[in-house]
Each structure stands twice: as structure tokens, then as C-alpha cells.
Image (cartoon, grey):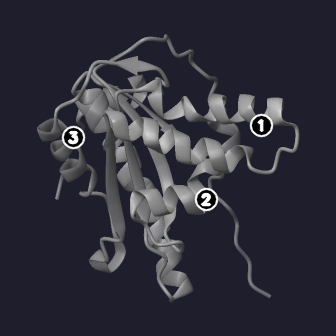
Amino acid sequence: MSYESSMDTLEAIRTRRSVGLSQGDVSRETIAELIETATLAPNHKLTQPWKFTVVKGAARERLGEVWGREAAAAIADPAKRTAMMEGEAKKPLRAPVVVVVSTRTDANAVTAEEDFAATAAVVQNFLLAAHAKGLSAAWKTGKITSSPGVKHFLGLDTSDRIIAMVYLGAQGTEVPGSRDRRVRTTITWLDELALTTA
């Protein structure tokens, strides 16, 4: 069986960039299409462990309030606590849509690890599909992803793992810079390695 190289796919991978600030709403139909495309990622035993929670409109403000309170809870100084709360609460407002991608945690450790990896692949598919449609997106994580209050707000189980908070918009309002990828230093070739047995 032979396969033809898809330059469109390669170009999408090479040109995709994370855009953390964006504007312009994205329709439900488009988001649903992105999710459907994303779930075509490799998934051992087809467990389909992922869940997508789409946060739009005023729900972003509520999410920010929940997270802001939790992020600032341990700060004793009132002024610093208020500043932290207000700053963290603004984060979900950096884009018109926040797509929270999570995975359940299987009781079997191996399955749980495979499900985590598969869900990460789903996130990459989502980002590439968004880029192919001319949308802006960014994969964000941080302490918010392990917040019990945030999980409760999103309707997730405390054992679920949030893999990504994908910020999504019709167009970016910032220009992301390029980063050097040190590819050669990460490759080990074993095809000409002399192997001996004792």
C-alpha cells in the first residue's frame, strides 16, 4: 500500500501557532465540527475517554470568578488577595470561547495513561482543525486545570483530568513569535547500531 504526501497537512502543522488573545465568536456548528474532527485521533481500544465542555458568553465570567476565588484563597493580605482574584478571573475572557478538554481516569493505570495520551492527541487535532479553518486557538493549562471548584463548575468528576483549556476565536489579536525547535538533538538513529549479545 502506498501513501501520497499531503502538503496541506504538513503546512498546517508547520504554520500553526498558539494565539492566546483572540476576538470574534465561533458558531456552535463550527465548534461541533472541530470536536468531531478532533476525536479521530488514535485511541487504543476505542475507549473514547474525552469530554468537551464549551464555555461561552457570560459563562466565561462565572468560570473566572470560580477560579479567581480558589486561586486567591490562600493569600492572607486582603489587597493582594483581591488583586490575584481579579487578575485570574480575567483569564477566561482572553477569547470568545473556551473549550475545556478533559479525560476520565480509568481504574486501570495503563488504560488511564493511554487515555491521557489519546486525549492530548485530540487536543492537537482540534488545534490543527481550527488553524485549517483560519481560526485562532491556544492550548492553556496551569493550576486552574486541577481546581476542584473549576471541575465542579464544569460538571466534571474530581478524578477527571483537564488536559487543555483551549482558547478559541475567529481571529487573533496578537502576533505569536516563532520558537527554535532543536530537532536534531532529539533524534537517535538505531538502524546502523551494532547490537551484540552476551
Q: In which quarter of the image is the C terminus?
A: bottom right
Give residue 102's position: percent from left, percent from top. Answer: 43, 60
Tag 3 and tag 1, C-beta contact below 8 Å: no
Q: Is mark 1 on a helix, strand or loop?
A: helix
- Relative depth, front residue between 42 and 81: 81
Q: In this view, does 177 lie to the left or right of 32?
A: right
The relative height of residue 135 versus residue 46 in the rendered view (above or below) is above
The answer to which quarter of the image holds residue 178 is: top right
Residue designated by label 1: 81
Give residue 148's position: percent from left, percent from top. Answer: 58, 63
Q: Residue 65 carries which label?
A: none
The answer to which quarter of the image holds residue 180 is: top right
Q: What element carries label 3?
A: helix
Q: How many neighbours does mark 1 have within 10 angstroms: few (below 14), some (14-19), or many (20 or more)?
A: some
Q: In this view of the protein, can residue 54 be seen by the observer?
A: yes
Q: In which quarter of the image is the N terminus?
A: bottom left
Amino acid type indicated by mark 3: Ile
The relative height of residue 118 versus residue 174 in the rendered view (above or below) is below
Q: Is residue 166 left or right of residue 149?
A: left
Amino acid type indicated by mark 2: Ser
Residue designated by label 3: 31
Give residue 103's position: percent from left, percent from top. Answer: 43, 66
Residue designated by label 2: 146
Q: Which residue is rendered at x = 49% and y = 10% of the image?
A: 175
Q: Is mark 2 on a helix, strand or loop?
A: helix
Q: Nearer the viewer, mark 2 or mark 3?
A: 2
Q: Which residue is rendered at x = 43% and y = 66% of the image?
A: 156
Q: In this view of the protein, can residue 7 be seen by the observer?
A: no
Q: Which residue is rendered at x = 40% and y = 54% of the image?
A: 101
Amino acid type indicated by mark 1: Arg
Tag 2 and tag 3, C-beta contact below 8 Å: no
Q: Tell me the CA gap for discs 3 and 1.
A: 35 Å
